[in-house]
Image: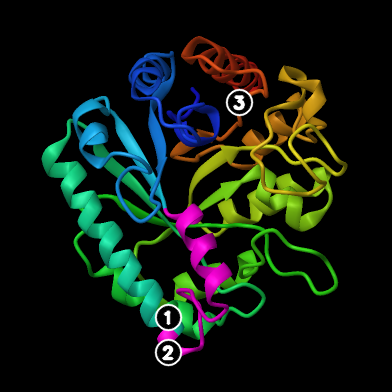
Amino acid sequence: MTAPILVSAYPVSPAHAVWDPALEADLLPAICALPGVAGLEVPWMGSIHPHDDAWFLAHVPAVSLAVTPIPFVMGRVGADARYGLASADDDGRAAALADLRAVAQGIARIDGESPASVDVVMLHTAPQAGGDVAALARSLDEVAGWGWQGARLVIEHCDAFVPGQEYSKGFLPLDDEIAAIEQTGAPIGLWMNWGRSAIELRDADAVSAQIARAAASGRLVGLAFSGAAPVQSVYGPAWIDAHLPIASTYPESQSLLDEQHVADALAAAPDVTWLGLKAARRLDDTTAADALATVVRNLDVIRAAS
């Protein structure tokens, strides 16, 4: 039995970049009606919705949500290299905690003012190229005690800083993230993203072993499928975190994520609670029907592999 799937709405929706409430009103419930889909991953970008909080609260379907502040975090680390939950700089860590307070307040609004429920909240181990395990443990201790409306807190592992290698996120290594969780004793899980591990490891065949290591920690909650390319593609330069779709669904993506790697990843995490699909729309997807077809093609590969 495949775990329930959360589909990341923002990379696949044409309305994310250019706001189109009619398109989004068609697309979100259509995604949630697909077999096996339990809900959506939605971004925190300083507010509940990138364009219109009130619209989102009124239109989000009655489904499970995972909230990820990663787009917001990346903007913050770009402006201040000290910023992050794992920052050894007191001001940088305090700023990240203050922003998470705002996320918690937003989740309380979703819980109270919409039909949806937030089941997962993702945390990220910024700063780039300089995280500290002890600082992260202190942050985790603090945030675990806040009100999260019953949502599960997870560290989403992004590509770690590797000396001499250009990074996309450049956060803490997986083993350091696990160590920080273990230091706290807090019920914080891990969330793996295939593409972000591939960006870190530069080896598609090595990703399933990293996923297995996360599973062996007993903390793995979610596994998301998102691709990455070792060469220039229609999505941009090599090794960027552009959420490439599964290779067979869009060969022009040059994605390393294919059917065999999907199957290997699923085998490495057989007891995962949630699966995720984080696939960018095709470049010619302009309508809700186009974007939905992209989701369906990728979900079909995951179902077949499982």
Res 215 label: none
Q: Nearer the viewer, residue 237 or 150?
A: 237
Mark 1: which amino acid? Arg
Reading the image, the residue beneath label 2 is 90
Q: Are marks 3 and 2 in contact (CB under 8 Å)?
A: no
Cα separation, mark 3 vs mark 2, equals 39 Å
Seen as rendered, the residue at the extreme left is 112
x%, y% of residue 236?
Answer: 77, 41
Choose the circle earlier in sequence order: 3 or 2: 2
Can residue 126 be seen?
A: no
Res 93 label: 1
Cα separation, mark 3 vs mark 1, equals 34 Å
Q: Nearer the viewer, residue 150 or 114?
A: 114
Cα separation, mark 1 vs mark 2, equals 5 Å
Magenta span includes 72: yes
Mark 3: which amino acid? Arg
Magenta span includes 85: yes
Reading the image, the residue beneath label 3 is 281
x%, y% of residue 278?
Answer: 56, 35
x%, y% of residue 116?
Answer: 23, 33
Choose the circle earlier in sequence order: 3 or 1: 1
The image quadrant of residue 270 is: top right
What residue appears at the point 49 percent right and 85 percent down from the top-left corner?
A: 134
Q: Which label sits in the foreground, 3 or 2?
A: 3
The image quadrant of residue 229 is: top right
Q: Which residues are magenta?
A: 69-91
